[in-house]
Image (cartoon, helix red, strand yellow):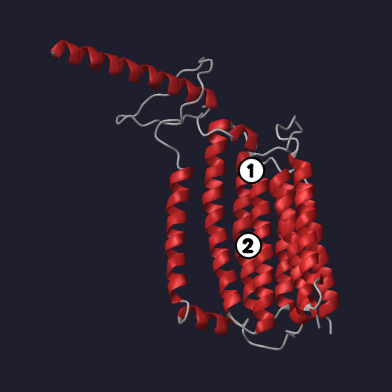
Amino acid sequence: MFTIPLFVLFGAMAVGCALAMVAQRNPLYSAISLIGVFVSLACLYMTLQAPFIAAVQVIVYAGAIMVLVVFVIMLLNVEEEVRRPVRLRFLVPVGVLLAAILIGEAAFILKLPGAASRIDAFGQRPSDVGLTASIGTALFTEYLLPFEVTSVLILMALVGAITLARRTATPRLAAPGNVDTEPPELGPRGEVFIRPGDTAETGRAFARHQLQRGEAAASAKRTGEEGER
Amino acid sequence: MIPLSWYLALSAVLFTIGVVGVIIKRNVISMFMCIELMLNAVNLTFVAFSSYFGDVTGQLFVFIVMTVAAAEAAVGLGIVIAIFRNRESLDVDDASVLRL
């Protein structure tokens, strides 16, 4: 009885927050709008009698994933998107055209003669499929293999994320810039210690230093080999 | 009593907004969030069908999609950090070539 107003309210909230997300230029505001979308979708799941999915939506999406995104935005100190000459200027009209086509397609399918009545013949009925108990039963009996494969996937993502975000022992080689800072001292086993006050400039200087040393060592080795011959 | 087609229409609208965002946004993190929005639109379809058909499979699929999205977030943001460390920019136009 309250479901139609609830659907209208949360559906409008979801669409409004999604539009705000695309319209915002600051990624942090986009993230907050996206959290609004997630929360209103969780409320829609409640109207669909899926309390477990609604709870997981709030915990995993609005909790874990968005915390990660906001953390990265703040870590990288992302400024607002600067307006600058876009190389692919035609993308905006293409995007709008694609949107119109997608919406038209969906409207066409839903408005096909008889389609809507056939879809809507499935009445929502009170059921217990959304309860945690029934989801858990299905997950650990019939769908056990996908569940286990998912755990392998998470392990792979864990290893991949650590490998990608790890600080390497030597700084990545940047474009040769002006070297005006002292390269940092090396530890006993060749590791780098970051000192307070070190900047990206120090890292570049160090990288250049390493490169020069490596070239020197390589040429020394080459001359040594030639001498042996 | 809400007709099922309403949920499908809402899901189509959300998905379209996500597609447009991926196409017109230039910031890697914003594009990433638009992809999350598209995943959520599809999740809504799954849950709606699952609830109307009285079948639990759709909600299980949503559960697995959420897991994949979490894994994608971890790896994707790792890639974003790696790109930022190399190029000091999050604009996709600055990362259009693989070499430095």
Horizontal and vertical percent for residue B92?
63, 38
User: Tag 2's secondary structure?
Assistant: helix
User: Tag 1's secondary structure?
Assistant: helix
Residue B95 higher or lower than A19, as above or below:
above
- Chain name for mark 2: A
Q: Which mark is residue B28?
A: 1
- Residue found at x 72% / y 88%: A125
Q: Is residue A199 visible?
A: no
Residue B88 higher or lower than A56, as above or below:
above
Q: Which mark is residue A103?
A: none
Between marks 2 and 1 in the image, the one whose residue lies nearer the viewer? 1
The residue lying furthest to the front in this view is: A113
Q: Is residue A100 visible?
A: yes
Residue type highlighted by circle 2: Tyr
Q: Which mark is residue A61?
A: 2
Residue type highlighted by circle 1: Val
Residue A223 higher or lower than A66, as above or below:
above
- Residue found at x 29% / y 18%: A218
Question: Is A24 placed left or right of B61 in the picture?
Answer: right
Horizontal and vertical percent for residue B82?
52, 39
Quarter that holds the C terminus of chain A: top left
